Amino acid sequence: MNALISVSDKSGIAELAHALHALGVGLISTGGTAQLLRDQGLPVREVADVTGFPEMLDGRVKTLHPMVHGGLLARRDLPAHMQALQTHGIDTIDLLVVNLYPFEATVAKPGCTLEDAIENIDIGGPAMVRSAAKNWKHVAVLTDAAQYGPAVDELRQHGGWSDTTRFALAVAAFNRISQYDGAISDHLSRIQVDGQLTVFPWQANGRFVKLQDLRYGENPHQLAAFYRDVNPAPGSLVMGVQLQGKELSYNNIADADAAWECVKSFATPACVIVKHANPCGVALGADALKAYRKAFQTDPTSAFGGIIAFNCAVDLATAEAVHKQFVEVLIAPSFSADALALLQSKANVRVMQIDLPPGGNTDWARGQNTVDIKRIGSGVLMQTADNHVLQASDLKVVTHKQPTPQQVEDLLFAWKVAKFVKSNAIVFCRDGMTMGVGAGQMSRLDSARIAAIKAGHANLSLQGTAVASDAFFPFRDGLDVVVDEGATCVIQPGGSMRDPEVIEAANERGVAMVFTGVRHFRH
């Protein structure tokens, strides 16, 4: 039995090669990998010795040879194939170990040039992988270090690999090649003549890995599955670990993502309760318990059966409070041992732990999508994600009355919440707490009225509240509604032809109003 090892990332290769050698497997390798194995005291044949042809063109050509591909592609069950190998002196290759030039890592580096990208496009590696994977009934192919241990264990126990194993390895190999080619296509499709990169490539190659099948989709008659990006952002929902509870449903995952994306946008302890994709309660607090109590107070009725997310540790006191209500999913960066022990008494509650993103200078480092995609009939819409962060210095006061420092805090809080509420969105807030949320109405007036109705049902006064509108007020009537309900300051994008009319109304009503210059439609 022969193994050909040619890897860019040499993690775990020495251990793998030692194990293969101990099992009597002959080792064939290339360049730096061969030198590493020799340094380990292992007998290894250079590919150049096998092919009788030296590596050339700075290593661009080394494995593209019939002595290699014949050994990979020959079917052992066809006498004609085996006779051809014998005639031409070609040895079979029974195990291929390859990982590819680091194209993805190279193009992710700032300042990567087209030349850098081109030189990191692997040719021989994918060709060998395809040959081995095509001949999966006779050849095993390893393309990931995580496969090394199980492959050695099976070889040690059974003297080879089962059809099931070889087929699974072949599928993984073809998937890796697909991912690699997709990354090349995406990057090169973005490069313009002047060397600059466009945001959107001429061809977009979605690459997703299935995490699990789901019981059903939005409704029981729909099939569904849960996938993650090949390269997921740290701190995103797909990186979470379910600690207990029933299997997550399609709707659970969608709502959990909405809750997590909202709560992790706050820097201080916060709680977000989501129901049917909309926040129905959001609040800040000195700790998780205080934030939860305020968020729950916004709309206790809608919170029933909702998704609750925290951006801070959940302790026993918080778990005891949450334990009193019906909750579908509970999310936090961490849970105390006694909190988890208590939650286990409700075995169906889905508890997820997600590490907060480390932060950084890119959307990805902050755990955010860079591009959002929406499926339409036979196509997709792509847009840069709504990752805009508003600062107090960005606000433009357009009224005679200036907002107080406390009002500015409330306005920024309300604006951050409104970003995660379906349009048309109207959000009343006070003291770091949502007081009324109106979402998803065709009329902005109706959203405002619904927010007030919900506040009334929760016995919350809207007097002295700050109001955020995700888009401009096209007429003064929307402003009049929120002021009639008790708002004393308003934040909105501005940009309407009737802005002067709305500003005049705000001055007439004696409220402060600020423009952001940014809209937050969410459909």
Image (cartoon, grey):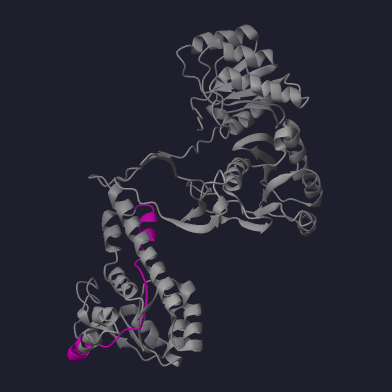
Q: Eyeballing the image, is 263 above or below 151? A: above
Q: Which residues are magenta?
A: 84-111
Q: Eyeballing the image, is 83 above or below 385? A: below
Q: Eyeballing the image, is 332 above or below 520? A: below
| Quadrant of the rendered image containing residue 483 | top right
Residue 410, horizontal then vertical, whole percent:
66, 28
Q: Report whether residue 347 is seen.
A: yes
Q: Report whether residue 403 is seen.
A: no
Residue 244, horizontal then vertical, whole percent:
69, 58
- Quadrant where the N terminus sits is bottom left
Residue nearest the observer in this picture, 189 or 438: 438
| Quadrant of the rendered image containing residue 199 | top left
Residue at point 26%, 84% (across, down): 78
Is 95 situated left or right of 119 in this image? right
Residue nearest the observer in this picture, 293 or 412: 293
Residue at point 61%, 37% (across, down): 276
Is 501 situated left or right of 405 in this image? left
Residue 15, horizontal then vertical, whole percent:
47, 83
Magenta includes 293?
no
Residue 357, horizontal then vertical, whole percent:
57, 51
Magenta includes 100?
yes
Please tell me how many numbered marks the rendered image carries. Answer: 0
Residue nearest the observer in this picture, 254 or 309: 254
Residue nearest the observer in this picture, 452 or 493: 452
